[in-house]
Image (cartoon, rainbow, N blue to C red):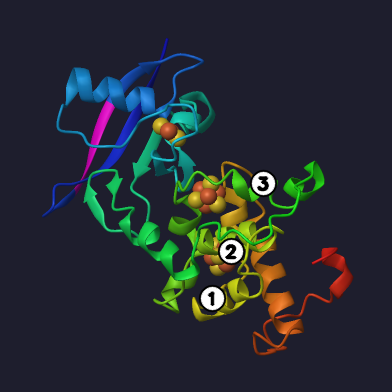
């Protein structure tokens, strides 16, 4: 068994501090297991979120050595640097206590883009190739990692955030969704064009959803259709309409 020092950014509602805990770990120990050990054996006041421990529920997002990750999917052996790991709460959300942040902000914003299926009449038969168009986006577990890492909020507080546009994409690509291009209008009103295309959302997504690519596709289509105002300064990528396949 090796030892690691976990440095954890704490917040009790009034003050911030860094606490350090030294624990033993093995090949399989995850960050969440280390936190559970600290909470049950060393400091019962330590707060963090955990449910499934299998990268399904999306509740254990945090910043691990500066990177946005799920604690339950991150092994200590893979992230320890010089025998230490720094754990911090995600940004762009209010910290409730220690590593627990308030998910309400991004969950409530989902209403802005009507992030739910609106059935079309008559319903068309669905084939496997139809589902493939939004297969990755369906996997979103609402973990908030992309929302926390996103720099666009610094310049635009009204920016809806990457999760909203993943949902836009998922339903926009569904031939049985009744909203169609109204979804692009909603995304525009939700400030999708404030995305700076840094790709951080795609990099951190534990489900490998191509978030930034989806945003680019929505924006490009919106501009082609005249829904979103053309702004040549924002798009210098040199791609063509057909690069995105069939809309
Ligand atoms: S690509 Fe856009 S949405 Fe994604 S993190 Fe960067 S600014 Fe935010
Ligand atoms: S898009 Fe990825 S990173 Fe963002 S909330 Fe969904 S699963 Fe998490
Ligand atoms: S505990 Fe459910 S995703 Fe980590």
- Magenta highlight range: 17-21
Residue occupying the point 64% across, 67% down: 215
Q: Is mark 1 within 8 Å of ligand 1?
A: no
Q: Are marks 1 and 2 in contact (CB under 8 Å)?
A: yes
Q: Earlier in the sequence, mark 3 or mark 2?
A: 3
In 3D space, how far apart are the residues under numbered discs 1 and 2 (Cα atoms)?
Answer: 8 Å
Of mark 1 and mark 2, the one earlier in the sequence is 2
**Which-is-in-front pick, marks 3 and 2?**
2
Q: Is 110 placed above or below 3 here?
A: below
Measured from the top left, where is residue 191 in percent x and y? 51, 78
Question: Residue 186 shows which numbered tag?
Answer: 1
- Residue 243: percent from left, percent from top: 86, 66
Percent x, y of residue 72: 44, 30
Residue 90 visible in image: yes
Disc 1 vs disc 3: which is toward the camera?
1
Asked if the residue at tag 3 contacts the one at tag 1, i.e. Cβ–Cβ closer than 8 Å, the answer is no
Residue linked to disc 3: 136
* Element type where label 2 sits in the image: helix
Could you say whether the residue bearing mark 3 is in a helix, strand or loop? helix
Say which quadrant the C terminus sits in: bottom right
Magenta-colored stretch includes residue 19: yes
Residue 148, how many percent across, how many down?
43, 56
Residue 92 can be seen, yes or no = no
Residue at image position (71%, 83%) is: 223
Residue 20 lies in the magenta-colored region:
yes
User: Relative to the observer, which residue lies in front, 60 or 126?
Assistant: 126
Distance of mark 1 from mark 3, alpha carbons? 21 Å
Residue matched to label 2 = 168
* Circle 2 residues within 10 Å: few <14, some 14–19, many ≥20: many
């Amino acid at each position: 068994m090796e030892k690691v020092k976990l440095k954890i950014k704490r917040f009790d509602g009034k003050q911030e501090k860094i606490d350090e805990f030294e624990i033993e770990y093995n090949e399989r120990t995850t960050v969440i297991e280390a936190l559970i050990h600290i909470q049950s054996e060393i400091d019962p006041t330590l707060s963090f979120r955990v449910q499934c421990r299998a990268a399904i529920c999306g509740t254990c997002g945090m910043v691990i050595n500066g990177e946005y990750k799920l604690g339950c999917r991150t092994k200590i052996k893979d992230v320890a640097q010089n025998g230490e790991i720094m754990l911090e709460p995600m940004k762009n959300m209010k910290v409730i206590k220690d590593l627990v942040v308030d998910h309400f902000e991004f969950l409530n914003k989902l209403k802005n883009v009507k992030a739910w299926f609106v059935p079309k009449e008559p319903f068309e038969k669905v084939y496997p190739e139809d589902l493939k168009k939004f297969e990755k986006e369906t996997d979103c577990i609402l973990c908030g990692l992309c929302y926390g890492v996103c720099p666009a909020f610094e310049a635009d507080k009204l920016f809806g955030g990457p999760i909203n546009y993943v949902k836009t994409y998922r339903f926009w690509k569904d031939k049985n969704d009744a909203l169609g291009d109204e979804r692009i209008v909603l995304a525009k009103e939700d400030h999708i064009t404030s995305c700076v295309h840094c790709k951080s959302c795609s990099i951190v997504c534990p489900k490998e959803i191509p978030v930034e690519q989806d945003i680019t596709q929505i924006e490009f289509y919106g501009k082609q259709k005249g829904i979103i105002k053309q702004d040549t300064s924002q798009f210098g990528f040199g791609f063509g309409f057909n690069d995105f396949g069939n809309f």
